[in-house]
Structure formats: C-alpha cells, structure tokens
Amino acid sequence: MTETILSLEGVTKRYSGHTAVAGFDLAVHRGQITGFLGPNGAGKTTSLRMALGIIKPDDGKVRLFGKSPNATTLQRVGFLPEERGIYKKMKAEDVIIFFGRMKGMTMPAARKAAREGLERFGLGGEAKKKIKDMSKGMAQKVQIIATLAHDPEFIILDEPFSGLDPVNQKMLEEMIRDEARRGKTILFSTHVMEHAERLCDQIVLISKGRKVFDGDVPSALSQVPRRVIIETSSDHDLKQVLSGQGGVEPQDAPEGLSGWTIELAPGSDAQDVLKACVEAGVRLARFEPMRAHLHDVFVELVEKSNREAV
C-alpha cells in the first residue's frame, strides 16, 4: 500500500467570520506529483500553510509523515512559498547556503549544494551576484535552488511558475520531472492548467475553500462533455441526422458553409457521428473531434461550484 506523506482530514480555517477552507480533505502519496489547483483566493495557500503547521486549522486534522507537523518532520520538506522572500543584499550562493544550514546541512555540504544547484539552473556564473542585482526570474530560481538544497523527500511549491518566462517555466517542469524520477514526492499549487496537465499523477481542485475534484488527469478530463465540430455545404437537418448522438447547436462557419457543434451523448463517440453523416450523404468540409483540456475541466467545475454556492 502506498505511503501517505501528507493528509488533511476535514480541515477548516476561518478568518474574521470568513471561511477560507471548509471541511477539506487531501492525501498526497509517496512518489506522486500532485497538482493542487484552483482560482486565486480558492484556499490553496491557506491549505498548504496548515499542511506545514504554519497556521492551525480551526477544525480537522493534519498529518505530515504520519505525525502532526513539527521541527523533525519539516526537516524532510522543501517549501517554496507563494510570497518570495530572500535577503536582497546577500549573494546568490550565500542565500542557498543559509537556507541549507537552516535545514541542518554542514557548511561544506551546503556550499556544494549551492554550487551544483546554480549550475543546474544555468546560474553558475551568478554565484557572487547579490539578489538585488538579479532579475525577478533569476532571484526566483535562486529561491527554488534553496528549497531543494537539503535534498528533501517532500517538495511543496506554491505557485512556482509565477513570474517565470516560458523558457524558465519549461526548465522548472523538467526539474519537477527529474525530482519525481529520483523518487521525490511533489505537491505544487497553480491556477495555470497546462503545467498540471503535463506533469501530474493526481489532480485536486479546490473552489471557494471546498474540494470539487480529486483524481487523475484522465478522470478529470472525463468531467467535461466531448464535442465534435462539423462544417458542411449540405442542407441536411443535422439534428435529425444525428438524433441520439448528442446535442447539436449551430456555430459560425466560413461563407458558403454551415457550422455545428455536437456535444456527444454518453455512450456515443466521434466515429458514430461520422458514420451517421456519411450514411446520410452529408458533405463534410470539416470534421474535428475536440480534445478536452484541463482548462475546460477547471472552468466547468469552478462555475458549477459557484452556481451551487449561490
């Protein structure tokens, strides 16, 4: 049975009458990459702070490596907070050494980790540069290196892609994959779905402090309707041709063509729609099954959650 590294059971946190997180459950298993998703203000950061014992839940239970978060269990964690905070007048190498020493590393080990980390992230020539003289993206990379310096078992990254350009976002994705290949357990929060769709074994979606989905990416994608786009020069009544295949709605199309969106019924697939069109003699200028994306799931489930909360 896979070990549970982090569990939140029914945790609730209130601030001045506002419920930031309500009855939230989360289980992160060893060796997995878990994406913690939700819009801004959904309760992601509050949940992560409770997971680390930074704040206490008003209700519920938190277990980190099977125990309440404490100094010993936190030594096994690398945490990148959403609010970046490193000493701007310190040199990049010294920042990493400082954080490594805070996690119990010896000076030689911390210095070695700093130099290797800077090389890994393309900052080998910036070791002696002060943080205040670095770009925002470079400084963020230094903080990521500091998060990993002590080789933690469990890596928690709060909005790690924020502030990074596309090249450095790709580099961070590769780092996450590399750490996972080394057997590390990773939890990262984001509101950018593309990263989670490419990286994650498990997806947890939170909206207004409540969990609205927990599962793998294929299960998440199954939450949204499958669609097919058709453009045709025929004057067939597609609602009649595709009776039973799903909902048929008109959409914009180039001049001389009529466009349709088919929302597939349960048990129907794109090939059934194509077969029905061919048998009816529909002249197809475009037939395009639309692949669902995690962004679509995000929008669908968050909007559903918002409607139910009204």
Image: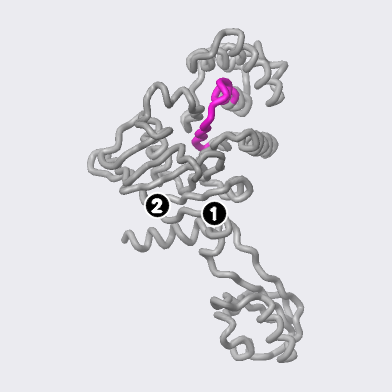
Q: Identify which amino acid the numbered label 2 is placed on.
A: Lys
* Left or right of residue 305: residue 141: right
For residue 79, above or below residue 5: above
Task: Report the label total.
Answer: 2
Asked whether 40 or 12 is in front, the reply is: 12
Which of these two is toward me, 185 or 276?
Answer: 185
Q: For the residues marked 2 and 1, what is the alpha-carbon distance in whole angstroms?
A: 14 Å
Instruction: Indicate the secondary structure of the residue bearing disc 2.
Output: strand
Q: Give the x, y percent position of residue 100.
A: 54, 16
Q: Is residue 20 left or right of residue 171?
A: left
Q: What residue is drawn where x is 39% and y is 43%?
A: 43
Q: Nearer the viewer, residue 250 or 11?
A: 11
Mark 2 or mark 1: name the one nearer the start of the chain: 2
**Mark 1 sits on what residue?**
216
Image quadrant occupied by the C terminus: bottom left
Instruction: Categorize mark 2 by other alpha carbons within 10 Å: few (<14), some (14-19), many (20+).
Output: many
Horizontal side of residue 278 vs 246, given as left or right: right
- Residue at the spot x=60%, y=12% of the render? 109
Q: Position of residue 278 (x, y in %)?
A: 74, 86
Q: Amino acid at mark 1?
A: Asp
Q: Which mark is residue 231?
A: none
What kind of element bears circle 1? Answer: loop
The residue where tag 2 is placed is: 211
Residue 72 visible, this orientation: yes
Foreground tag (2 vs 1): 1
Look at the image and tell me whether residue 169 can be seen.
no
Residue 70, percent across and down?
37, 25
Q: Residue at x 61, y 17 (%)?
A: 133
User: Where is residue 236 drawn, in percent x and y?
Assistant: 67, 90
**Above-or-below relation of 142 to 218:** above
Residue stretch rendered in magenta on the structure = 145-159
Q: In this rendering, would 272 be left or right of 100?
A: right
